[in-house]
Image: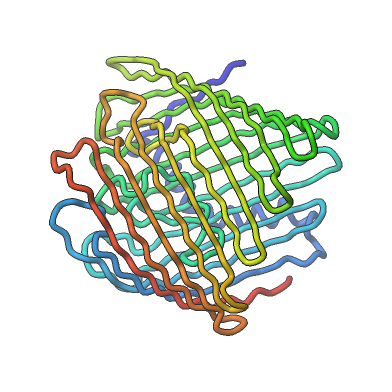
Amino acid sequence: MVFAVGRAPHSGDSGGVGLMAMTRGLPCVAVALIAVIFSDVVLGAALELQPSASIRLFYDDNAALTTQEHDFSAGSEFLGAVGISRETEAVTLQGIARLNLLLDAAGDVYRDKDNQLVSLLFASKGELSRWQVYGSWRRDSIVRAATVTQEGDANVEPDDDVDAGLVQVSIRRNRLVLRPSWSRELSPRSAVGVGYRLDHVVYDDSAEGLFDYQDHALSGYHFYRITERDQITTSLNLKSYRSSGGVREEGEWDNDRFNIMLGLQHSYSETASGHFQVGWYKARFANIEESGDTDGYLFRIYGEKRTGLTRFSARIGRTNFSSGAGDVVNADELSLSMVRDLTETMGFALSVRAFQSKSLRSDNPYTNRRYLALTPTLSWQITRWWSLDTSYRYRRQKRDWEINYDSAESNSVYLTVRYERPASL
């Protein structure tokens, strides 16, 4: 099998400019694609349209997660979004387009006035096979990231953004993610699948320690059901990472990885399940001046539990993530989420994400750090269309390379009033 990837363009090259122009026009392109691709599929059928508008007030005593002297950040923000959804036995369609517009903010951290995000998932299910395409484009910054979920949403699964809190300046980031995949049932006991992922990140301006990059991943997997409750899983991944130094640093770092994972998926009951995986990776990296290789172990544990009023999910493991710091990192990650219905109109959600990242290269300590984010959220459905969310977020970060060995801490509070009125088309 041959797996070759071309060079990622510098932000100052015509390729980088072309990508930026492309990403800025992606919202219009996404609308056109929806109209063309799905017109035959959903024509004459009801689509669920979910427009919403929100006003958010926020306060953060250390938005940049710095150990230096800093001021607090506070202000207001407008969030406008349009979601679409369609679910049948043969077709699943989910999408969202959102604009976060900063109305007013104190301090220098929140310099970017707006964030945009477009996300689309389309899946087609046949008798034995299923294929799906997921894509997202976002224009944000590492300090003020745009996520698929909003504050107070029940789906609190975090994005795989290991660069959260990496820098203390607001640098514009354009991030394009594409994930097509296909799977087929070979027998009542076994199934196979293949997938591809592109993660392309371009920064508008130069900043110390940040690099444009492309990360490509080609994957294949196999499931075999042993019993009604147990199945063995096998997955192979070929990954290729290319960072561009541009005007910030001479040379480019290349990184190619091979991962293999074996696992056991077990259903404890109709409301509880777990997935246990162990594996091994081999990585080779190089630039103009030097090269090297490394290997190590990987593991992942997933768990889900549902009760009448509460839903729990958790994952813990070690995996490889691409980073805007010009490298690929090993991340030991813990993610927990809990959503509970307190009453018919009130709910509580808690999300926890912690990771310790370390560069695969011994000479690049910039990404070596420990990061923790904890967010409890209380939501109230005031009327059928109006809701109120209030949340608190605590973040803590320790950088291994800093002379100042103190940890940076941040406390932030959000208050969001949302109007959402779904309609069928």
For the residue pair 9 and 66, the one nearer the viewer reads as 66
Q: Is residue 412 above or below residue 252?
A: below
The colour scheme is rainbow
Extreme residue in the front direction = 268
Q: Residue at x 53, y 35 (%)?
A: 300
For the residue pair 145 and 349, the one nearer the viewer reads as 349
Q: Where is residue 119 shown, x and y percent of the image?
A: 57, 54
Q: Is residue 82 above or below residue 178?
A: below
Extreme residue in the bottom direction = 383
For the residue pair 231 and 197, the one nearer the viewer reads as 231
Q: Residue at x 24, y 37 (%)?
A: 400
Task: Classify residue 406 as left or right of residue 204.
Answer: left
Quarter of the image for the N terminus: give it: top right
Give the image quarter of residue 402: top left
Q: Where is residue 215 shown, x and y percent of the image?
A: 47, 33
Give the image quarter of residue 32: bottom right
Q: Where is residue 62 shown, x and y percent of the image?
A: 24, 60
Give the image quarter of residue 170: bottom left
Q: Residue at x 79, y 30 (%)?
A: 190
For the residue pair 178 and 226, the one nearer the viewer reads as 226
Quarter of the image for the C terminus: give it: bottom right
Task: Classify residue 262 as left or right of residue 159.
Answer: right
Q: How many marks?
A: 0
Q: Where is residue 112 shown, x and y percent of the image?
A: 32, 60
